[in-house]
Image (tube, rainbow, N blue to C red):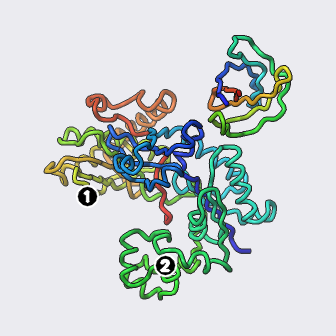
């Protein structure tokens, strides 16, 4: 029996949730935008009416207002979106336990084993769609197919509130005429390279030889050829079985530019607190620290270094990250965004060479685990390093957004 | 359709089941819930919101009572 994969994509997720709670806005163009005073002033989501004005996700607020002066702009309410995302996942879990989230509003479901009891993939998809509409007041687009890539294409094919079934028999009619950029992992640079060689559609990719694509795009060329021909066999992997997380990181665009090492140290400390806490939650330690810096001209660099021994201590991560930062940044330009990432992850209780001050490190680990417990009970800001109270114009925590992070297709 | 938040007296069972018993209306009076006709997750598309929806009978009038994130509201025309 072939696989039956569903890709469920909630339509205009943030905007739909807002319109559900504000019925008076339902017939108006609505956009959920980052806070412009914190310089996150871009469109995060828009409703169908705003879409008809040509407003796009990622657009700056003033550009959106130029296209639609009566656009209703709302601030994001992430805890509410996370609640809805969890409610949707509860519905999915009644159909299969093989659920792989792909961001906050998208999921793959492998319902192969459920089809014997619950009916075909199409039937399950329609049932899920109707339940989400009735129980949560949201619409969803669902792609049903025999692999993850085509299921995703299916959910993008017809929007909103639609089910598209792509089978081994009909994929050449549905998928192949679509533009190449609709295929997973074809970004604007790849699209340019392909179109310069007269490869415009997914069908053109499928009909090219894998060797030729490899010559143009490297190993990704071959991957795209596999995707386009429907040979993708990537399994749906629930996060529970995700034993190969590549890294844990946080980054932030700051309300003001950073102009000094003191500022940078503050932000690095704040980010490291969050990264360390997430490492401890996952029972992981890291061997490598990476720092990402983007300046006020949107030029960015990434630098990384190895640690002597693996760690999940915020102070060690912050110390190393700041060391890397000082080596690589001279403040010719001010900084707009900063990120800290922990890489080369190992299990927290795996064996490694002891140091002379291992006992001291063990005590610090116990201390930071205790801080986690206090934060869990009384909130993240109940215990903070004193340094994070010194700059009221910069944020002192990032934990709120930890649940919302993009997920990679290849893990 | 209006959304009216109300104070509710409810029974919480050992199993975690919540059963509303009565609520305080805008006039300050407490109204007993005579019967719960249906209970399910639902969106309140007209009043705005989402939660556990109780279709209830109060003095022979049918109402929808929602439990949305620790708050109760009634859909009222």
Please identify the residue farthest to the top as the structure is shown: B28
Which percent across, then down, holds residue A350?
Answer: 46, 53
Q: CA distance from mark 2 to mark 1?
A: 34 Å
Residue at the image position 70 percent from the left and 60 percent from the top: A125
Asked if residue A147 is positioned above or below residue A74 in the image, the reply reads below
Quadrant occupied by the N terminus of chain A: bottom right
Chain where mark 1 sits = A
The image's mark for residue A301 is: 1
Q: Nearer the viewer, mark 2 or mark 1?
A: 2
Mark number for residue A264?
Answer: none
Discs 2, 1 touching: Cβ within 8 Å: no
**Residue A301: quarter of image:** bottom left
Towards the viewer: A69 or A117:
A69
- Residues marked 2 and 1, same chain: yes
Q: What number is the disc on residue A201? A: 2
Q: Nearer the viewer, residue B71 or A371?
A: B71
Q: Quadrant of residue A387?
A: top left
Q: Is residue A305 above or below residue A36?
A: below
Q: Secondary structure at mark 2?
A: loop
Question: Label 2: few (<14), some or many (≥20) within 10 Å?
Answer: many
Vertical placement of residue A207 versus A84, above or below = below
Task: Tell which subunit mark 2 falls on.
Answer: A
Q: Position of residue A177 (x, y in %)?
A: 54, 78
Q: Is residue B21 left or right of residue A159?
A: right
* Mark nearer the N terminus (2 vs 1): 2
In this picture, residue A285 sits left or right of residue A167: left
Seen from the viewer's position, the closer of residues A201 and A240 is A201
SS for dot 1: strand
Q: Is residue A155 visible?
A: yes
Q: Position of residue A231 (x, y in %)?
A: 58, 78
């Amino acid at each position: 029996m072939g696989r039956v994969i569903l890709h469920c994509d909630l339509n205009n997720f943030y905007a739909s949730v807002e319109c559900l709670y504000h019925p008076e806005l339902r017939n108006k163009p609505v956009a959920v935008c980052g806070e412009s005073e914190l310089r996150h002033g871009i469109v995060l989501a828009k409703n169908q009416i705003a879409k008809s004005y040509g407003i796009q996700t990622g657009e700056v607020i003033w550009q959106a207002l130029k296209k639609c002066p009566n656009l209703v702009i709302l601030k994001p309410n992430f805890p509410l979106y996370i609640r809805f995302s969890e409610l949707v996942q509860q519905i999915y879990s009644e159909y299969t336990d093989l659920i792989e989230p792909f961001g906050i509003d998208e999921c793959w479901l492998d319902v192969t084993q459920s089809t014997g009891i619950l009916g075909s993939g199409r039937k399950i998809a329609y049932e899920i769609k109707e339940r989400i509409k009735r129980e949560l007041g949201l619409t969803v687009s669902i792609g049903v197919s025999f692999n993850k890539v085509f299921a995703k294409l299916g959910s993008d094919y017809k929007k909103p509130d639609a089910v598209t079934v792509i089978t081994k028999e009909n994929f050449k009619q549905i998928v192949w005429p679509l533009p190449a950029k609709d295929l997973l992992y074809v970004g604007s640079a790849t699209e340019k390279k392909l179109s310069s060689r007269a490869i415009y559609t997914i069908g053109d990719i499928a009909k090219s030889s894998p060797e030729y694509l490899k010559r143009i795009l490297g190993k990704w060329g071959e991957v795209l050829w596999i995707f386009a021909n429907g040979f993708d066999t990537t399994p749906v992997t629930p996060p529970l079985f995700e034993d190969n997380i590549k890294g844990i990181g946080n980054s932030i665009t700051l309300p003001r530019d950073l102009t000094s090492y003191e500022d940078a140290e503050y932000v690095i400390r704040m980010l490291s607190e969050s990264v360390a806490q997430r490492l401890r939650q996952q029972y992981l330690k890291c061997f490598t620290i990476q720092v990402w810096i983007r300046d006020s001209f949107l030029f960015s660099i990434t630098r990384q270094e190895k640690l002597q021994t693996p760690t999940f201590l915020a102070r060690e991560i912050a110390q190393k990250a700041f060391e890397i930062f000082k080596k690589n940044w001279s403040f010719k330009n001010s900084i707009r965004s900063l990120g800290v990432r922990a890489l080369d992850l190992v299990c927290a209780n795996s064996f490694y060479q002891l140091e002379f001050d291992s006992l001291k490190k063990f005590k610090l680990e116990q201390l930071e685990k205790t801080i986690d417990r206090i934060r869990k009970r009384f909130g993240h800001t109940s215990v903070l390093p004193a340094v994070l109270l010194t700059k009221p114009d910069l944020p002192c925590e990032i934990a709120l957004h930890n649940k919302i992070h993009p997920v990679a297709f290849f893990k | 359709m209006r959304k009216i938040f109300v104070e509710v007296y409810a029974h919480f069972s050992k199993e975690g089941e919540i059963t509303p018993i009565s609520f305080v209306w805008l006039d300050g009076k407490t109204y007993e819930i005579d019967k719960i006709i249906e209970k399910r997750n639902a969106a309140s598309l007209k009043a705005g919101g989402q939660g556990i929806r109780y279709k209830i009978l109060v003095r022979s009038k049918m109402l929808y009572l929602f439990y949305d994130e620790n708050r109760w509201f009634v859909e009222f025309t």
